[in-house]
Amino acid sequence: MNKKLLIIICIGLLTGCQNNNKQQKEETPDESSTTTELTDETNTETPLDPEFTSYLNKIPDLELPYSTACFSDYKNSPEIDKELKMKFLEGEWEWPHRRIPTNSEFIAVMNLAPADVVLPIIKTYKKSGEIISSQQMFFDYCGGEPGYYHSEHIIIKPNLVITHIDSTWTHQLDSLENEIEGTEKLEVKNFDYRILADGKIVKVE
């Protein structure tokens, strides 16, 4: 498995995911975070809904560029009253993790939801708290079995482009289901999502 993790790192480097020698950040237990307090004067063209402001001010900022993968360990998600939280989420099991910095008339939040692995979900909002767009960022089974291993990895960049890297390893197996050395194949698929100026999240074709 170490070999596969090394290949993932190489893929990230080859796709130019680092930015001006700033190391990409994987979620770690001692991750430091700050929360930029929002007020009615923040981006005053459209005032923030007071209840939505209270919700957002409990969510720490996400430092960009940021990367995460299938088995990343997410720490220090904010504790928010369920009644308040459910006003701005679509699923009972979803929870907010980090607020994504924007310079626009919308708010972006990375939420999380449980599945076989923890799923990142990017949501954008109007300043009223109404959801503009929502996009799950992991799609297929992560993990493996004899002859097969699959992993997904995303990078959120300061320009609000989200690069998704999908990596699949396959081996031929012998009669005992042992992987046959020298038969490994790696397939990598990259694609991007972009958060537009109006807050819509679109896949870049």
Image: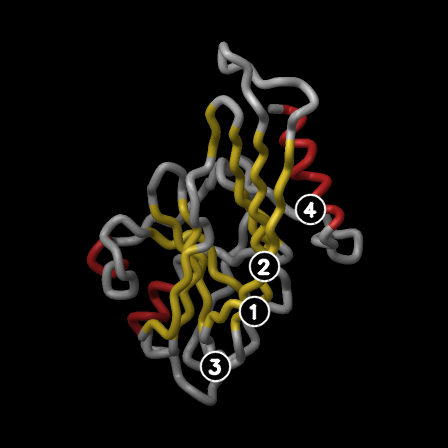
* Label pair 2/1, CB-CB below 8 angstroms: yes
Closer to the chain start, of discs 3 and 2, is 2
Q: Position of residue 111 (x, y in %)?
A: 40, 55
| Three-letter code for the amino acid on which mark 4 is drawn | Gly
Residue behind mark 3: 198
Residue position marked by numbered label 4 in the rendering = 12
- The disc, 1 or 3, on the residue closer to the chain's N-terminal end is 3
The residue type indicated by label 2 comes to Phe
Please tell me which residue is depicted at 44% across the width and 43% down the height of the picture: 76
Mark 1: which secondary structure? strand
Going from the N terminus, do you reach mark 4 or mark 3 first?
4
Q: Quadrant of the C terminus?
A: bottom right
Q: Is residue 15 above or below residue 141?
A: below
The residue that disc 2 covers is 191
| CA gap, disc 3 and disc 2 | 21 Å
Mark 3 residue type: Asp
Up-down relation of residue 145 to residue 59 (above or below):
above
Does the CB distance between marks 3 and 2 fall below 8 Å?
no
Relative vertical location of residue 159 with respect to residue 127 in this rendering, above or below = above
Q: CA distance from mark 4 to mark 1?
A: 19 Å
Give the residue at the far front of this rendering: 175
In the picture of the structure, the residue carrying the numbered disc 1 is 204
